[in-house]
Amino acid sequence: MPGFSLFPLQNNFVHSSLILNIKEALNLIHMKQVFIPLMALVLFACQPKEKKMYVSSLPDIQQKVEEFKTVKLTTDLSALSEKEQQMLPYLFEAAKIMDDLFWKQSWGDKDELLNNTADENLKKFMVINYGPWERLNNNESFVDSIGEKPKGVNFYPADMTKEEFEAFDGEGKDGLYTIIKRNEAGALEVVPYNVAYREELNKAADLLRKAAALAEDEGLKKYLELRADAFLSNDYFASDMAWMSMKTNTIDFVVGPIENYEDALFGYKAAFESFILIKDKEWSDKLTRFAALLPELQKSLPVDAAYKSEVPGSDSDLGAYDALFYGGDCNSGSKTIAINLPNDPEVQLQKGSRKLQLKNSMRAKFDHILVPISQVLINPEQQQHVKFDAFFENTMFHEVAHGLGIKNTINGKGDVRTSLKDTYSSIEEAKADILGLFMVKQLVEMGELSNHDLMDNYVTFVAGIFRSVRFGAASAHGKANMMRFNYFEEQGAFSYNAERGYYTVDFDKMTEAMNALSADILVMQGNGDYETAQKMLADLGVIRPALQKDLDRIAKAGIPRDIVFEQGPEVLGLK
Ligand SMILES: [Zn+2]
């Protein structure tokens, strides 16, 4: 049959569910040669290649989406110079690339997922979760025929076991900026980020250089240039150091592979994210004076000298910012309201770390979530102690407290991060939570916080646990919160009135429990005690039935689960 190829027809028949089989088709060809091409066309048009559509496995996906309160991310742009305003479009574009890279790391092909989903609400929920697993519900799948979320997502091959990884002798296999793949022979292979994500990172580097060319602040200019270099070299040290040296910049841009929570298999791999931030100078000045007190606060920790022997960097600084964009990791699951960076222990030892408080998103969470929760669960007589200032302090000092304690074990087990393995993130968050509160108490005693009622911090702190504990056991923060809640309850730091259904904080017992838990965690970290950390998380890092009842009450009260952002140049009127 010259001039007539069977292949399109054949493919079509094979893939379609039409009754016609190949034999019948061939008969048709013999009988009506002229008619066949036309018929093939018709069949082709009627029977597009079978597509797999994603459908929700939950009864009411719209309600799931509505649990998120949408908040606009804006600020007063008149605080920016003309050139700073011109930088923003480049930053937004680079920030978006980080968002896309996180999709790639956590799920894979974003377009394939969204384009094959017809239900608009399901699509929205996928975007909120960066994939088909519900982050605020133990990463349960909400899409039909999608299995469990792989612990190592795309950082490791799906079929790789922990044992295989541990036996693998690959240089940089536990590095923050490498992924593990299988080569053609099926063996494990270490691939650095600048190779794995070359195209995207080249583009981002180019955008950062364009923004740097407009930067008037020398510190910001240098950081953006070095960050661009880091994308290409995969060595982030110099840019982290430069970021630490920025002091006078109004715009800040957190960008790159940063946190390791998404790697639930080992906690080694850094996930891509981005924040565009505008400094609130007034609040920042207020916060700066606390940074200088870190070494002194370290000395006051309630543990033996050996567990506080390292001197935290005193170059650390605290700043308050309004956020204009959250991209990637930090925009998935619960929204971060404070940042403590960089994570590189070497940079931390040399320069300390910077703490960025995201004031506009913090206020949104306090107003729309924390206050309504406290109205359900806190003794009405203690309601007046739920205050934004206390919430702000608790959150701020959580970040400062990451710099306290020690980074290296005291018994030669190496650094704390590596020796605590997969428990590290949860234990470190638990440490920061409890030491943050401990610090407020210390500062009150030191006379640094005048006219201060510590009870505000305690009650707001307990109300804050209910807010965070609703995230379930999936995140490091969630586990840390549950650990603290169960520990406090066992120590009598608060009591529960079952008849009225509310909690009452006991000031003195709360203080005792706080000191005891601080000591337990600092010692566990200093000893690099993986077994105790595992046991503590297994025993305490869980939601017990009594608490679940209260969480169900919160769920029924119609309080938003979290916030999501309307963000980007359009929201700011830049486009
Ligand atoms: Zn933290």
Image: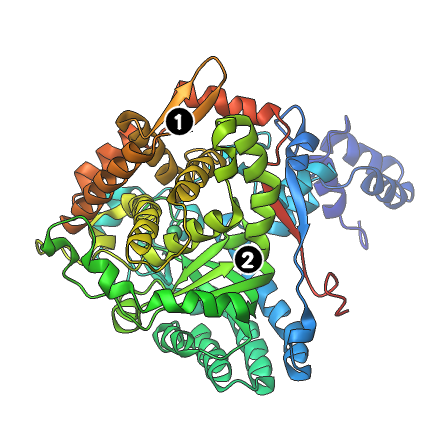
Secondary structure of the residue carrying numbered label 2:
helix
Query: Does residue 553 appear left or right of residue 504 in this picture?
Result: right
Nearest to the observer: residue 371 or residue 419: 371
Query: Quadrant of the rendered structure where residue 560 is?
Result: top right
- Which residue is drawn at the image coordinates 49% and 28% (left, top)? 381
The amino acid marked with disc number 1 is Ile
Secondary structure of the residue carrying numbered label 1:
loop
Query: Quadrant of the rendered structure where residue 233 is?
Result: bottom left
Residue 304 image offset from top left, x and y in percent:
11, 51
Rendered position, 517 above or below 79: above
The amino acid marked with disc number 2 is Lys
**Residue that carries the numbered disc 2 in the rendered image:** 359
First in sequence: mark 1 vs mark 2: 2
Rendered position, 44 above or below 466: below
Question: Could you tell me how far apart the alpha carbons at marks 1 and 2 are, in whole angstroms?
Answer: 29 Å
Nearest to the observer: residue 107 or residue 230: 230
Residue 434 image offset from top left, x and y in percent:
32, 45
**Residue that carries the numbered disc 1 in the rendered image:** 543
Rendered position, 567 above or below 427: below
Is residue 151 visible from the viewing direction of this image?
A: no
Furthest residue toward front: 451
